[in-house]
Amino acid sequence: MNFFRGVMGGQPAGPQPSGAETIQKLCDRVASSTLLEDRRDAVRALKSLSKKYRLEVGTQAMNHLLQILQTDRSDSEIIGYALDTLFNIICNDEEEEQDESEDAASMGKQKAVAVPDENPQKQVDDLGVQFTDKLIQEPENVTLLLTMLEEFDFHVRWPGVKLLTILLKNQCVQLQAIILVSPMGVSRLMDLLADSREVIRNDGLLLLQQLTKNNAAIQKIVAFENAFERLLDIITEEGSSDGGIVVEDCLILLLNLLRNNSSNQNFFKEGSYIQRMKPWFEVGDDNSGWSAQKVTNLHLMLQLVRVMVSPTNSPGATASCQKSMFQCGLLQQLCTILMATGVPADILTETINTVSEVIRGSQVNQDFFASVNAPSNPPRPAIVVLLMSMVNERQPFVLRCAVLYCFQCFLYRNQKGQGEIVATLLPSTIDANSISAGQLLCGGLFSADSLSNWCAAVALAHALQDNLTQKEQLLRVQLATSLGKPPVSLLQQCTNILSQGSKVQTRVGLLMLLCTWISNCPIAVTHFLHNQENVPFLTGQISENLGEDERLVQGLCALLLGICIYHNDNSLENYTKEKLKQLIEKRIGKENFVEKLSFITKHELYSRAAQKPQPVFPSPEQMLFDHEFTKLVKDLEGVITKAVHKSSEEEKKEEETKKTIEQHDSIVTQYKELIREQDSQLQELREQVSSMSSQKELMQSSLAQQLSQIQQHKDQYNLLKLKLGKDSQGQAGSQADGAQVNGLQTEELGQLREEVEELRRQQATLHSQLGEKETLISTLRSGSSQEAGDATGGPVNTDMTQELEALRSQIQSQQAEISQLQTERTELLRRAEAKSSEAGVAGGSSEDSALLADLEGKLAAQTSETDRLKAEVQGLTEGRAGMEQQLASATSTVAILQAEKAKLQGELQESKKEQDDLLMLLADQDQKIHSLKQKLKDLGEAVDDDDDLRDQTDDDYDEEEDDEEKDD
């Protein structure tokens, strides 16, 4: 008890032990105690000492605490104490907070001591990392901590989440590898997002943020564990952009899952989650008073959109996301924020960058952006409003960079947009009453602000990028410099500003514009060389030994002169390729020229600009290179170097080689066209062959059918020839055969006539029987109202039913006979046709012609007779159908009569029953009268004796009963 009093703060009974001794005793107690309560008290004491004696508790008690997690899992209280203790010895936050509070208390006095204090803090950080390494040496310990998360108890789950989070902060890569191979490890962590307790859910978000850092495998697993759905639901529940820190944590986790992970990006798009982002950017009319948290949330939301359409993604995935954002209205919503008032500057800047990447390279999105107007009076295009901000030196630097990036993305692979921008500079389209994009660019190009000069030059260069037509059109632009002087071309004005020796940033921008303009455009090269002052100015700039700041200008001048050589069509005699190379060799030197040209790629800002399209610079002074221009330099540096070093002979050989190659290409083109023509002809011939093959197959099948028919005719002819005989008796034999055939057919026709007559007789009999039945039915109807008819209705009905059954059987037999006659007739026709065909085959000889004619005439007569008989059979069939209908009508009439008879019999039985009841009443009354008369006689009264009358009445009644019985 004294031991626990010392630990828990009681008064010591003797000398107080040191902290290390106390911790050692507590560890022994944890390891050796058999009672759970003792172990629980010891772990609680270690927890209370873990912050003050962090090193001692960590070195002595960690293994015991891990053992507690394994053995005492059934007690949530001791498990919670153990997890809290492990968290205290590994976490560095408490010490950092303590140091920060101490520094805040002595801010003015500790400036000299601030540097030595870094070492203790570094030691504290190292201590947390050392304890983390010790814990994760055994992967089973991490798996054990993951199983702790399955406990729903708050005092177990929350410390477990915090402990895993600090472990990931200290040793992220190692712990990620362990969790990745742990069974259901990521799934257990994902379950934290579904916890109803917000503290655990929010700390689970922080844990997943650390877990998903720079690990694509874990990011995919988390995404396919339905993370996107859960996170978007949490964002919606928390109020979207108006939410608190939880929304920020969710957005950071989403960024971790999507950044540089094409698989998750595709899953996010295919899951229709882009559509759920649109409500985030719905802002009202009153945008004043944005909270810092809302600005942070919206900034992260815009970054999330940019991750999906980043230029570093694959072109196909980016285009698909851009299409989805336009279709769901997300781009329209972003443009609404872009043109809204009261939006904070940093949100406006990020929105411009986001819109830039949503429209970059997408023709549909670029066309929509070109149609957006600012809510001004009169309405102005959004592009014009943005360019006004870009050339305004009072606007923030980051905002001007964002507008330039937006303009570049609008013109990226958009020849239609490039033509519209250049058209605003042409004399025929200039409107003096409105401000156009071309006017703003020219104004910025020649303003006093060097940054405006650079931005305008780069923007105009993007209007000419990879567009030969617009490069030639821009040569038509004329500028009025001052009153009374003739206008000069835009190209000449740019060279004039260069020769005036303006700031380095301005000259770099103009040189980039000129290089882009004349590159791959011989007409522009000719216009540039036509000015006699341009080439001497360039050679002078290149040959001078200037300072470090001017080296970049020298390199760009060398590049411009090299383009004039490489893309020169030798249309000017004074400035042909050969003369320009001789000029370089005399005044500059080839090696010196190449060295100055290499200054561009050696510049430190060149590599930074070449990394990504967005212009991001720490300060305006470092804004020198454009991303697209770095691509141009990369393509031209090598070819210009070769062009300068080539001699005239090599140049001639190269020209001859080019001509030979051109001739070869033309020949190859001709052969390709010839091959295409031959290929089309070959295809047509193949189609013809296939059609002819099908026709051949049809003809072969038709020929086979004809051959089979001929063979059948031959067989029939041979058979007929055998039958007719080979000698002179063939004619007699044929006549006998004809007579036999004729006799056979006559006999069959006679049989048919007899059968038809029999059918007619049967039909007449049936008609007579039907008439008798109708007479009987009318008799039954007339006598149905009489009671005597009821007494005789039974036998008549029975006889009629029997006759009807006999009539049905006769009709069925007649149907069978008719079917048999039809079959015999068909057989007779078939045999007649066979005989006719045999007669046709045998008719080839002149001797049998008369016989065949006779046979054909008889066959025609027999055929007509057969048709007549067929018509008669058809008439008999229709008569039978009518008789069947009459029979059915008679049957229904009989059924009606039977029903009426049953009804009359029922009424007769009821009347008999009533008569019996009346007789019983009469007998009772007679008995009563007799007894009364007897009483009167006994009393001496005189009573008439009417017994004789009663006997007579009884006799009459008996006679009536006998008559009724006879009737029944």
Image (cartoon, rainbow, N blue to C red):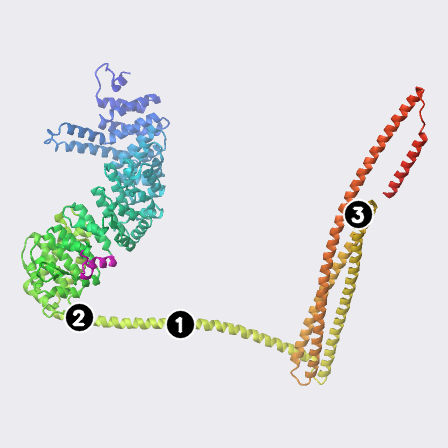
Q: Residues within 10 Å of mark 2 (few under 14, many from 20)?
A: few
Q: Nearer the viewer, mark 3 or mark 2?
A: 3
Instruction: Please indicate whether residue 774 sits to the left or right of residue 81 in the image.
Output: right
- Callout 1: SS: helix
The kind of residue tagged 1 is: Glu
- Residue annotated with mark 2: 655
- Residues under numbered marks 3 and 2 in contact, where contact means CB atoms less than 8 Å apart: no
Mark seen at residue 684: 1
Viewer-nearest of labels 2 and 1? 1
Residue 356 to residue 174: above or below: below
Q: Is residue 272 above or below residue 944?
A: below
Q: Tell me if residue 125 comes above or below residue 773 in the rendering.
A: above
- Depth check: 456 or 161 in front? 456
Residue under numbered circle 3: 784
Q: Nearer the viewer, residue 615 or 494?
A: 494
Secondary structure under tag 2 reads helix
Q: Position of residue 179 (x, y in %)?
A: 32, 39
Instruction: Give whichever of discs 3 and 2 has the lower sequence position.
Output: 2
Left or right: where 287 falls relative to 719: left
Stretch of the chain drawn in magenta:
413-432
Residue 924 position within the rendered picture, expressed as x and y whole percent measured from the top left: 86, 28
